[in-house]
Image (spheres, rainbow, N blue to C red):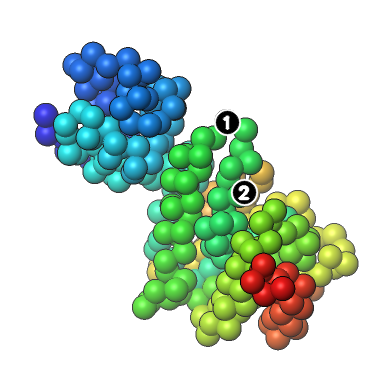
Amino acid sequence: MPARKSTGTADAKQVLVKELQRLREASGFSYRELAELTNYDASYLQRLHTGESNGSPEALAALDNVYSTGHLRGLWELSKSAGFTKYFRKFATLEAQAISRADYHASLIPGILQTAAYARELLRTHPHRSDEEAEAMVELRMERQANLFGAEAIIARIVIDELALLRPLGDSAAWADQLDHLMDCARRPNLTLQILPSNAGAHYLIGGGVSLLWLPAGKCVAQMEGTSTGQLVDDPLDIEVTRLGYDQIRDRSLSPVESLNVLKKLREGTPRCNEV
């Protein structure tokens, strides 16, 4: 059966789930039998067929092989924006249109500067998220970074809280890679990277994160982030308050040169095994 045409990524996931259910019913396979045929866990496959899991391209390719189809992975590609939590989808669309941006997070390396390993370790901390789901979200996060490093890279200012740098990854080699990446970013002409010292005092954005986007028409929007929730802000007064809050931490941050020197010292203290 050919894949139905989708009117967008929102209903593409619904089409995928219905198609998976139809194919399993027609095949007569139990989830245990599918697990044996695909080498994926039966409970994971059940969640995939009911839409509780977003899945991965590899899992859908394996099911394409079992069901003798060729369109399941394509449907997954259309629906993968569902890997963003609901509150984030509109922001992700605006993010792709931005001509400049400014970011800060109080306890993490901002997502747009995370390496895949950093994002992977972070996303796997969710108690109800499978490795396959985490991997799909890692891929999406890496794709979000494209407009910072491509041929048409946008201007971006990123403030990293020193506390995020004092919380390294469990894998020292992966943490060394993250620090190397931050240093490479700090040297890019379109990126301004600053570190907010831990002794900077209280500020408006303490305890959370923010991403400010400037769109082609001159409008500014912001995404305010908590641990697992977020809010898209576009009211002019709220945006003004948020911008002033961001200016507050930027003014208290180390200069770009000083910030790069801090990263260098951290990197010197984080050798890989082959550097010891």
The secondary element bearing badge 2 is classed as: helix
Looking at the image, residue 20 sits to the left or right of residue 252; the answer is left
In-front residue for pair 135/40:
40
Relative to 91, 230 lies left or right: right
Q: Are marks 2 and 1 in contact (CB under 8 Å)?
A: no
The residue at 47%/71% (across/down) is 148
Q: Which is nearer the eye, 212 or 220? A: 212
* Quadrant of image for the N terminus: top left
Q: Residues within 10 Å of mark 1 (few under 14, many from 20)?
A: few
Judged left or right of residue 178, residue 79 is left
| Residue bearing the label numbered 1 | 128
36 vs 2: above or below = above
Kind of residue at disc 1:
His
Q: Amino acid at mark 2?
A: Leu
Q: Residue at x 66, y 44 (%)?
A: 227
Q: For residue 257, which quarter of the picture?
A: bottom right
Q: SS of the residue at dot 1?
A: loop
The label on residue 122 is: 2
Q: Is residue 128 visible?
A: yes
Sequence-wise first label, 2 or 1: 2
Quarter where residue 39 is shown: top left
Residue drawn at x 84%, y 65% as measured from the top left: 198
Q: Percent x, y for residue 37?
A: 31, 27
